[in-house]
Image (cartoon, rainbow, N blue to C red):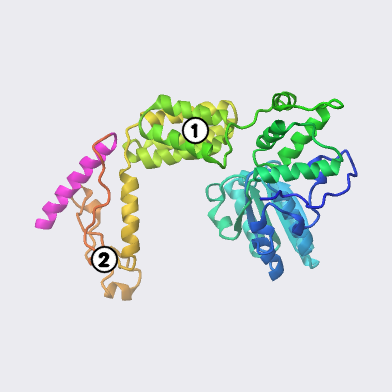
Amino acid sequence: MADLFSSDPQPAAQPGRPLADRLRPSALAEVVGQEHLTGEDGALTRMIRSGSLGSMIFWGPPGTGKTTVARLLAGETGLAFEQISAIFSGVADLKKVFDTARMRRSNGRQTLLFVDEIHRFNRAQQDSFLPVMEDGTVILVGATTENPSFELNAALLSRARVLTFRSLEPESIERLLERAEKLEGKDLPLNDEARAVLVRMADGDGRASLTLAEEVWRAARPGEIFDAEGLQRVVQRRAPIYDKGQDGHYNLISALHKSVRGSDPDAALYYLARMFDAGEDPLFIGRRLVRMAVEDIGLADPQAVVIANAAKDAYDFLGSPEGELALAHACVYLATAPKSNGVYVAFKAAMRKAKEHGSLRPPAHILNAPTKLMKEEGYGSGYRYDHDEPDAFSGQDYFPEALGRQKFYDPPDRGFEREIRKRLDWWAKLRRERHQR
């Protein structure tokens, strides 16, 4: 994959500007590295050709060109460009931007509103975008490094297309460094090993690679060439132990997950520490801990998902390194909790059955009858209100008649699910007794 910056660097004017800024492309066609979006057959290219640009969410890691692409989109479509950051903006700022966009639209020009870190807005603030998106006052382009499915309102997502930006490959970072050298008119003072280490330090972030390159040029004395150790000394940064897109990333998260599933808190802490040490995104780890709670512990300990989710939120609130301890607490809790995949297995079985028999109508007695015709058709007839029955349990059948009763959930006799099994066995006994009457 090539890099995201211009294939034709601009002249080295205005030397006070950061290198990354000077290497920005001046047209969307110059952007490379996101060819699935900006290439000849890319999603954004098709939108521009159609003459219709819709609201979008740009999802991807830092330094992949989200802001640059949004600005270029506005330029190529003749839209006014407005940019705000969810970190520094509030309700008053949004109102001001919307009012300006309305005035601009009344004069015949639409606004592309770029919102950086859009996931930082709360639910009410996100909802405030809906009216101006629907009436065409703005075309919203939101940028986020977090999974939009978890961080953005469903209503907002339903009105915007999510486009994924990809991390730069090592070859792309290398090409970017070559273009920086061409722009600066000098080579980076690094030997081959140090250059490879610098590429790894960038970790797929094009902007970070150029910032590192500037640090190296500033630190080097005339004629000095840094080796790998010297590079890490002058930039005070260590290369990641593994590439997040390669085997090391998946091997360690797999080892962490299996250690938690295997109820080994010591091994789980070891792999958790290795992932922190390797520079893994702690919020990714937090999300995986939530996944472990719902997949491998489930209702054997209903507090597991609460604690895992709270730890993820605590890290988001505290940051590093304090927040890492919250994730470690959750990791140990999950590893020492009773294990069950009962709901996980039941859900998959229910999904299979739903796909096989998705057209079957529920039995008439559990359907509402809001109209006279539906009452005449038997909707709701024979339904017994469970709270009026002995033990608040009627024992009625709720599956479609053509399907018959099914059993998906079989809780193990462990943890809290031991109590759930007792309840289910009691209800099964009552159901048999009442069906025999």
User: Element type at marker 1?
Assistant: helix
Magenta residues? 415-437
Q: Is there any visible trace of residue 86 in the rendered image?
A: no
Q: Residue at x 67, y 34 (%)?
A: 201
Q: Nearer the viewer, mark 2 or mark 1?
A: 1
Residue 204 x/y as whole percent? 65, 42
Of the pair 15 and 129, the residue shown nearer to us = 15
Q: Is there any visible trace of residue 293 in the rendered image?
A: yes
Residue 148 x/y as whole percent? 57, 50
Q: Is residue 214 above or below residue 348?
A: above
Q: CA distance from mark 2 to mark 1?
A: 43 Å
Residue 411 x/y as whole percent? 26, 42
Q: Quadrant of residue 56?
A: bottom right
Q: Count the marks.
A: 2
Main SS of residues in magenta: helix
2 and 1 marks in contact (CB < 8 Å): no
**Is 387 situated left or right of 90 in this image?**
left
Say what amino acid the circle numbered 1 marks: Ala
Identify the disc placed on residue 363. 2
> Quick check: is 424 in the magenta stretch?
yes
Identify the disc placed on residue 311. 1
Of the pair 394 and 45, the residue shown nearer to us = 45
**Is 174 situated left or right of 145 in this image?**
right
